[in-house]
Image: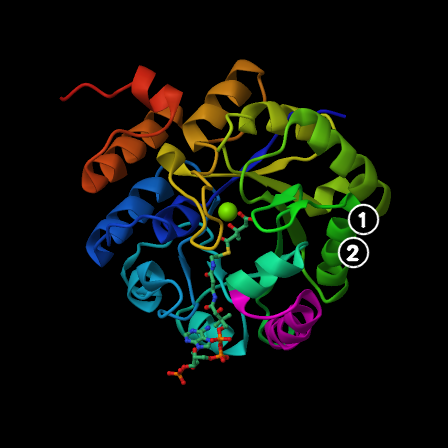
Amino acid sequence: MRPNRVTLYEVGPRDGLQAETAMVSTADKIALIDRLSATGLSYIEAASFVSPKWVPQMGDAAEVMAGIQRSVQYPVLTPNLKGYEGALAAGADIVAIFGAASESFSQKNINCSIAESLNRFAPVCDAARRDGVYVRGYVSCVIGCPYEGKIAPQAVADVAEGLLDMGCYEISLGDTIGVGTPADVAKLLDVISARISSDKLAVHFHDTYGQALANILTSLDYGIATIDSSVGGLGGCPYAPGASGNVATEDVLYMLNGMNIETGVDLDKIIEAAWFISDVLGRPPRSKVALAMRPTSP
Ligand code: HMG
Ligand code: MG
């Protein structure tokens, strides 16, 4: 059941940098993505084509996409057709639509109900199908919501199935505020895996309460083989107060290497990228592994 190969889906340049209060320059974002492209990662979520009034940190998405050296896949977030058109013009091959299992979070994050969000995503999926663009689907608040508390696994499964039905190739299950424990994850995946095959699922853990690695281990035992993570443990969500960074790519990689699970990703190069962006931000990385394995100057 536990996979022997895992795909790491890097979200640092998007989920990470969207939550930083400091505005990172376009040049530094491009430099980070170019460094990550040389690590063996296959997916690097590069930007969001969202309203710059809502998330100013992602306002330079087109410039970032134009500036990077492309060698792997660079998905971008698109909440609606306007965002999709921007992403298409920027040459994105994969876009991600993002819904939630919590009504309150949906309202706060994308200013509409869950049902309205699915109505907005459908034309994005139709256009993507026409244009040969792949669509990833996110479901946020799969365990807890900052406004509503506990979320029922059935509510998560309903939204996830809605996104798959409209054409998403994969659903990323997001513990947006990082409240889940392995027991919560097992309860969730018992329900989800009865309805959706594990090869269509990814997990996306924020590490607010230090549970992310344990939750990933639990997810591996359900056969899930795509893990979202963020270099240096960057991250959060502007509409989820208190949410800390995503689980750090280097922490996940250290664990998978130790378990002999293949990723194709070079740990030293990820750590170098973690220190690069942390130096830009003027603070140390949030991950244990980057602190333990700080690169020495040449
Ligand atoms: P709205 O205000 O309801 O949108 O926002 P609207 O359609 O009424 O348009 C209002 C204005 O926004 C108009 O401009 C539109 O042109 C503009 P104005 O006429 O006022 O000058 N607009 C846009 N501009 C640029 N790009 C667009 C776009 N769409 C409309 N795509 C909207 C609705 C969805 C746009 C807004 O709520 C929004 O941008 N939200 C994004 C929030 C966000 O990015 N959150 C973080 C990502 S989700 C996350 O982090 C969770 C995740 O990591 C998983 C997990 O952890 O669980 C994925
Ligand atoms: Mg997130």
Q: Which type of secondary structure does the marked residue at label 2 adopt?
A: helix
The residue drawn where x is 77% and y is 44% is: 153
Q: Which residue is mark 2?
A: 158
The residue sitting at 63% across, 43% down in the picture is: 144
- Asked if the residues shown at circle 1 and circle 2 are in contact, with their CB atoms under 8 angstroms apart, the answer is yes
Residues packed near mark 2 inside 10 Å, few (<14), some (14 to 19) or many (20 plus): few
* Foreground residue among 41 and 135: 135
Type of amino acid under label 2: Asp
What range of the chain is rendered magenta?
A: 110-128
The C terminus - image quarter:
top left
Q: Quadrant of residue 26?
A: bottom left
- Nearer to the camera, 47 or 211: 211
Above or below 43: residue 55: below
Q: Is residue 5 left or right of residue 48?
A: right
Outermost residue to the left: 298
Residue 79: % across, % down = 53, 68
Mark 1 sits on what residue?
Answer: 154
Say if disc 2 is inside 8 Å of ligand 1.
no
